[in-house]
Image: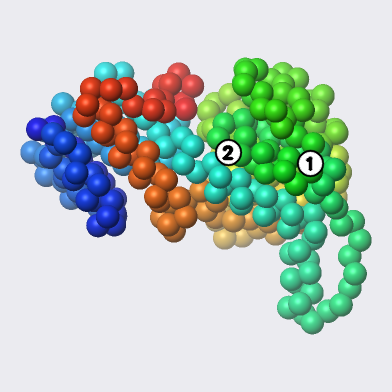
Amino acid sequence: MTKVIVTGKHTEAVKARFLALPDAEMIFAEKPDDISEKELADAEIYAGPLRPEVCEKMPKLRFVQLFSAGANGFGWLPERIMLANAYGAYGDSIAEHMLTTTLMAMKRMPEYLKMQEREGWELLTDIDRFEGSKVLSVGMGAIGTSYLKKAAALGASCYGVRRTIHDQPDFVEKLVTPADMDELLPEMDVVALSLPGTSEVGGMFDERRLRLMKRTAILINVGRGNSVVTEDLIRVLEDGHLKAACLDVMDPEPLSAGHPLWTAPRTYLTPHISGGYRAGVNYGRVMDVAIENVRRVLAGELPVHVVDRRLGY
């Protein structure tokens, strides 16, 4: 029997699905610290976030299944251990969040809500239409692709940036690599980032790139906060450049009290919640991926969404 450790809080229905997997002894623990040294030493499969000091106690470990889509923080994991993420489980939900913030900014809804609080009455100008707008997704994984699909359905012209050019969806008018992205930025009404937290995207949107965007453009970031230089973004916004910045991720994260990004003009912040499964929004889809991959490994098959350790995703 292969010993499998599953960490985190899970419903009884999910536990039952794990327990139904053949030829496996399941060990459930809310936290890694709740697992005995003997159980760690004997386990071959681990589902959940894994720390290096826990991994060191697991000489038989051969497969780790993450519940997250992000996997760039696992460069320390020994090469003998296969790593898979929950790629695809969050795409549609995060895309809906992106669509919500896009429309919110285009229609200036936060300002109308503030009017309601003060019982004011003012008709705002500079209200944009989503239909006919030009939308650029920087990052064309499950999240960026889902966002553009929804944007195209609402009548936007869609463009994408991908590390290498392949698999261009029929609803995308043009796909470019990061080297050619600057040519598109001045034309875009919305620039949406869903980038992984790799070193090559760190600081990608500095002051130069932000000012290449239209003064009336909307910036969205749901990937990793380090892809935008925070100080540069604040400076650009204070100069009246950009219609809005809608950030679900930021650098640093979480923001400390008094950080200037809290009060930067036309900035709308959410606390990294667009793809969280703990609220139940994506929990079922994440567990579907995790259970199927554990089943595959137990059966001697290759799991889906194996992480390329060189790329970090």
> Residue 191: image x %, image y %?
73, 39
- 159 left or right of 126 in image: left
Residue 289: quadrant of the picture: top left
> Residue 276: image x %, image y %?
47, 51
Question: Do the residues bearing badges 1 and 2 touch, measured as CB atoms within 8 Å?
Answer: no
Residue 176: quadrant of the picture: top right
Q: To which residue does mark 1 refer? A: 156
Q: Is residue 229 in sight in this rendering?
A: no
- Circle 1 Cα neighbour tier, 10 Å, few/some/many (<14 / 14–19 / ≥20): many
Residue visible at 42% across and 28% down in the picture: 305
Residue visible at 85% across and 53% down in the picture: 128
Q: Say which of 220 and 100 sits in front.
A: 100
Which residue type carries mark 2? Ile
Residue 268 to residue 183: above or below? below
Callout 2: SS: helix
Which residue type carries mark 1? Ala
- 251 left or right of 122 in image: left
- 48 left or right of 311 in image: left
Instruction: Give the numbered dot on residue 143.
Output: 2
Instruction: Give the numbered dot on residue 131.
Output: none
- 8 left or right of 182 in image: left
Residue visible at 31% across and 18% down in the picture: 79
**Which of the two labelled residues, at mark 1 and mark 2, occupies the earlier sequence position?**
2
- Circle 2 Cα neighbour tier, 10 Å, few/some/many (<14 / 14–19 / ≥20): many
> Residue 40: image x %, image y %?
15, 37
Residue 190 to residue 79: above or below? below
Residue 103 to residue 201: above or below? below
Residue visible at 72% across and 18% down in the picture: 179
Q: Say which of 242 and 67 sits in front.
A: 67
> Residue 84: image x %, image y %?
37, 30
> For the residues marked 1 and 2, what is the alpha-carbon distance in whole angstroms?
17 Å
Mark 1 or 2, which is nearer the eye? Answer: 1
